[in-house]
Amino acid sequence: MRKLLARLTLAELRAECVRMELCQDGEELTSMKKPELARLIKEFLLACGNDPTSFDFSAEAAEEPEVGPLTNPTYSTSSNLGVSQPPSFSLVGPRRGHRWAAWSDEFQTYVSLFGELSPERKTALLLHCAGSEVQQWKKTLTVVPAEDEDQYSALLRAMNDAFSPVESILFERYRLGEIKQLVGEPLDDFATRLRVQARFCKLLCASCNAPCEEDALVASMIKNTTSSKFRQLVFEKRLSRLDEVLQLGRALESAEVHSQEMIKESVLASEYKGPKGTRRVGGNPNPQTPAMKPIKCKFCAGMHMPLKSQCKAYGKTCNQCGRMNHFASCCEMSNSVVSKVTELPHSGASKRAFVNAVVEGQSLTFLLDLGANVNVLPRRFIPAERTQKHEGHIVAFGGDRIPTLGSVHLPLHLKGSRPKSVTFLVTDTQQPILGSQACIDLGLVTVHRPSFLCNQLNLEEPSLKVLNKEFDHLFKESEAHTMNHTKAVVHVKEDAQPRYLRARPVPLALRDRVKEELVDRGTLERVESSEWASPIVTVLKPEGKVRICADNTCTISPVIEKHLYPLPHPDELFGDLSGAEVFSKLDFRHCYEQYELDARSKDLLTINTPLGLMRYKALPYGLSSAPAIVQAAQEKLLDGIENVKIYIDDLLVYSKSMREHQITLRKIYERLSAAGARLNLKKCIFGTHEFTYLGFKVSKQGKAVDPNLVRPVLEFPTPSTSSQVKSFLGLVQFYGQFVKNLSLVAAPLHELAKPTVDFAWSKEAEECFETIKKTLSNAPILTYYDPVLPLYLSTDASPIGLGAVLSHVIDGVDRPIAFASRKLSAAEKNYSQIDREATGIMFGLNRFERHLLGRKFTIRTDHKPLEYILTPRKELPLVVTARLSRFALRLAMFSYEITHVKGSLNLNADALSRGPLDPPDDAIDDTGKLQCLALSSYSTEVRELQKATEEDESLSAVIEAARTDNWSKVTQKSFLSKRHQFSIKDNMLFWGIRFVVPSSLRSKFIEELHLSHRGIVKMKATSRSKVWWPNIDQDIEDLVNVCSTCQSNAPSPPSKFVPFSPASPWERVHIDFLHFKNKDFLILVDAGSKWIEAASMTNTSTVHTLQRLLYWFSRFGFPKGVHSDNGPQFANPAFRARLSEWGVKLTLSPPYHPQSNGQAERAVRILKDLMRKNPNIPVDELLFTYRSTPLACGKSPAELLLARPVRTRLDGLLPLSAKQSKEPVRVKAPVWCKNFNAKTPKW
């Protein structure tokens, strides 16, 4: 046949192409030349299994040169092999790395056809095929072969380094999710394009680290298919395997084709076309179409008559391949795949797998087709009489039917194994095929079935998109939004006493930004007064903005009443998910701030700011009772809706079908819309089959632990010192009960950790190390999170990293939930040891916040000072670093206890901190800018400060001690007392936010403070927000005291008040008027005894005032003096004259000095308080109570004035003593008796 084809004329070749259906359009066939036709026939013969290597079309090609718009000028024909060489590689264009990978594979296949070639010939062939651009690039490069490397290998290595793609796994996975099925594209072709892209996504199985692409391919295929019916059937049948999904898709495509044939709807042109050289099975052998019937054009994708003049793409250049007469959207180079795998080459033909096997004494080459569900044997290998009758047919790739001639059971023998019986379907095809199940049974393929997807792909149904668009108002990004008719209530203990703390000073550089933040913040409102007031703490963000937080640790937090509403147990959340296949997760936007506070709660949450008192309108973050409050409100909001689980601000929606899921989501949306709620679209997931929820991977198969939780254990770095080996062994020993034969497995590491053995990491140690890590990473070492069991967070910090372990205590034994570790950033390495340990705690809180927030837990640290500094039962020390202040505010939102454990008992966290992972990109020193503000107002250069600090021996010792937490070399008490409050920034020492000035610069700084001669108080106030050194206050005082300018301009010292005490009671009295409830009272108080007289005055004239005074003087006598204010009654000359007649001296208070009449002012206040509290008791009775009550001296005013105690009602209630009840009488003593008879003596 090959000789026959070689002798065919051009017309005969065209006729052969028509017969073989290599061309679908007669007009295109006419324009094709003989070389192009010959190439199509060669590819057809290659697909049929013939050997085309002896083909030589060079003679025919020479007769008619290769021209025409549909020929590819980049391909040439080898005169020796008759095989097309790869096209030239272009260095310009998108996705160069991926294009190079494909071109390199094609070139390697091409070179293999030449047999053994010398490195020089391979190099020349490589440059020739690559083209002129690569040749010019080669001239600019000097390639030096490595040892045992030839010139060809060195050049190929250099080209791979230069052209290989820069990997971005996230972007490649994004592209995988964006690949859409084209209109009319067969499902197998669509799957091929997905497989090609999946190669760059590096989808690995979490359990065995092997490639795992099947689940991701199925997810993308279902998401982006054009057939909603196909998608619905996949969900209904609960298919998850790729071969099952493809089989269903092929059946649907075949059924659609047959349905169209039955109703005689003639399809004149396909909307999708495979590459030239593919044979369409079952098509119409006649390529001619009716002349005047519109068709859908494959070149422009439009509907028009089959004429070039009506095609919009005719004469246009494709942006994809550069060829003429078609658009890029219809380009074969980007979209072409092969339509039938059983007979024609696939787009990945170079990677097809074959196996040799013996069947019935015949050696056959089988194609391994994992997409096939049956085994196929051509009829030429088996006599017809041995086949059994078989009803049905095979649906091929693309939906074509292949009739079966019967079935047969035959033994199949593979080399090195025993024969196994295999069932074959006999067909009239050329290639024997082994399907997927046979490949598995024969051990030719190993199937890895992970328990969950390696890469989460969101399957958002079109119906859900429509639903989300209908309720798009739920996803609006609005600030300070609260729900309707829903108020949060914060309760405090009954015996709680209000605490009002003054506003803390704000650094001068931050005042304007703090005021702007307070004004712009929509969750605050001004108030005039409040019994409760918490100060604020400001933290400077890296972008220059400020974060304002309320410090409730000393005000409301200790007395807040814990909300007893329970958070849901995991068994409640996951117990009802059996049978669910579709899931969604809804996340509330600023959930807490959507709940408005009631009036009483607003007063409790008042903050004291530079702008005055302000209070929160909505529930703020940071309250320990807030999670329970929100949980109760959320459950009440969605009460009655089935198939929804609520955990604070996360909603889990689950259903058995997409239709049921859509109904449930609509109910939730309607309820949220009526309440005025808002959702965070960026954190929501809709209609997925698998996602992460509360630390678990949720899917229809069940829940599994998130593999990211055990990543720190798997990535523990190889130890490089014996101390690191000890740390790792400490971690292993801590969980030793979970590792079988641990002492035997870890023996090499124990030997290496001995102090008498020199450290040398051997292959045996490496194998032991990897075995232990692999064993520890298994599920048995990680227990499930349980809100009921005691929860512990163990943290530690080393000079290189941070470590944290979350664990439960079960039956008295620690069971870890998850590990976490990371390296310290460059800035964090400069922290003092206490700051590093606190940073480790914050790292653990941030990493496991979902597990810790809203429940009681215990923090375990091996740094003793943190137990006292961060304890929730004590107030934060007055002077701590800004970092610790911020950490304490962060801790306020948790309900925790902190305990100290010895370092030897904290080896699990210690090991993670000494073998950390790389730090996150955002692990920066977020207090650096705040500290630098303390230096910005001084002219001293930072380099000068650093140099002076390094030259100061005492400060250098303190810095070293702060970094190593070893203070043995520091002797100065002023430094030792503050050792837990120092931090280091750019090799400079800070106490809190105050820069510690070296001794050589202290005179310069104190002169700067003394500028403008502001005095001792102002200088100290400025220094306390800027700088510090030992005895700075004394240095300031000494400087001011010797400054002549300060002393000469100092104000006079204030005069002291000298009280003039009377020598005896009723010597001097004070008088004043009291106005209470529309009544006027004249008040008199004795300065010596504090005796008070009061009388209601209907007329306050001088005459009536004198009358009342005379009434009092008539009982107690005239005093020596009367003191009053400058009231018109008292300043009247008649008043003074009358008192003079009585021998009484009148003195008046000086203007603007009412304190000289303080006795009367105090008496007025005492009497007014008594009348306000006892409105129904007469004034005289109130005065009697006051006069009989002892003063601070132990005697009452009555005793001081009358020289005797007065009898009160209490005295009448007491029993009389024997002395008072009767006179003493002796026994038998004579007594006199009263005789009432008038006629006898009286006695």
Image: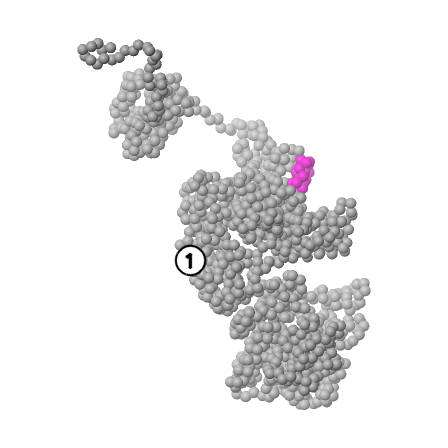
Q: Residue 383 at x, y = what percent? A: 69, 86
Q: Please state if 393 lies on the left or on the right of 364 as rendered.
A: left
Image: 263 above or below 1009: below
Q: What element carries label 1?
A: helix
> Residue 291 in the image: x percent, y percent?
54, 88
> Which residue type does callout 1 highlight?
Ala
- Verify whether residue 681 appears in magenta: no
Can see residue 1136?
yes
130 relative to 231 in the view: left or right = right
Q: Between residues 211 and 120, which one lies in front from this camera angle?
A: 211
Q: In front here: 135 or 554? A: 554
Please report the bounds of the magenta region as a residue range.
946-970
At 52% across and 74% down in the image, what residue appears?
A: 229
Above or below, 322 relative to 1006: below
Q: Is the magenta stretch mostly helix, strand or loop?
A: helix
Q: Tell me the residue at 43%/57% (across/down).
A: 637
